[in-house]
Image (cartoon, rainbow, N blue to C red):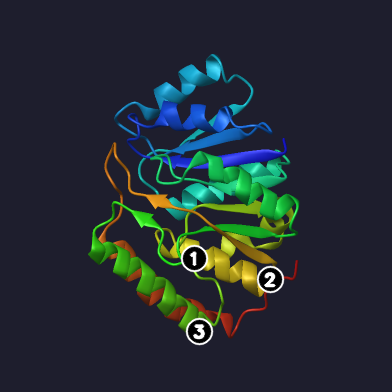
Amino acid sequence: MERLVIIPTYNEKENIEAIITAVMELPLGFNVLVIDDGSPDGTAAIVKSLMAGKFKGRLHLVERSGKLGLGTAYITGFKWAIEHKADYIFEMDADFSHNPQDLLKLYDACANQGADLAIGSRYITGVNVVNWPMGRVLMSYFASKYVRTVLGVKIKDTTAGFVCYKRHLLETIELDKIRFKGYAFQIEMKYTAYKCGAKIIEVPIVFVNRVLGTSKMSGGIFSEALLGVIRLKISSWFRKYPKI
């Protein structure tokens, strides 16, 4: 298995079949792993029907009981990907806020430009966000700037959730030491990759706010990120990171 896209879901019945189909129709041949946190709307049932039908062998599902957090969903997916020898592992939302076509750009950055981690960046060429309220745009933009300042990294979009990892980077990162479960998870993963000596490339994308379904974002998630960054910096003073 060369390319695996991990899609965490909770109540995404309006989007899940369309997003899986869009990924599967891309050239190069992507596999998809859905991590569903017990969606009561039947998201997992839709995935199972697709697994038994036109995407048999390329679509996979891990079902978990209850909402256990975005971070733990991705950690579960990463471990599954490593076990199944996926070479390039992608994070992607189910709601089309990330354009499936941009998976090709992330893959190119890792496969042909030498990146260990490619980030689909909303802020590398200005602010490329569509249909977000201005308050949320400003909060996200300045949160990334705050993270860069505190952690001392040059990554423009530290909170991005659209990325590609090479397997050897995920094997180097000590996944069981990743502590954050919400928005701060994305920051912790990027900072850990940076501390492990990964080559990181940001690829410009346009982020489009979801049309169908309900956003899982909340003010508490942003608070976790803002306070978590300080804890992350302090803990890094007392931790030795493995090198890639």
Give the vertical position of 74 relative to 185 (above or below): above
Q: Can you see residue 121? A: yes
Whether the residues at callouts 3 and 1 have beta carbons within 8 Å, the answer is no
> Residue at horizontal 49%, vertical 78%?
148
Of 118 and 219, nearer the camera is: 118
Q: Is 70 left or right of 120, judged from the image as shown?
A: left
- The x, y position of residue 87, in whole percent, is 72, 45
**Number of the label disc, if any, that sits on residue 57:** none
**Sequence-first tag of 3 and 2:** 2
The answer for how far apart the CA atoms under marks 3 and 1 are is 31 Å
Give the vertical position of 62 relative to 171 (above or below): above
Q: Label 3, secondary structure: give it.
A: helix
* Residue mark closest to the camera, 3 vs 1: 1
**Label 2 sits on residue:** 196
**Label 1 sits on residue:** 125
Q: Can you see residue 77? A: no
The answer for how far apart the CA atoms under marks 3 and 2 are is 17 Å
**Label 3 sits on residue:** 234
**Sequence-first tag of 3 and 1:** 1
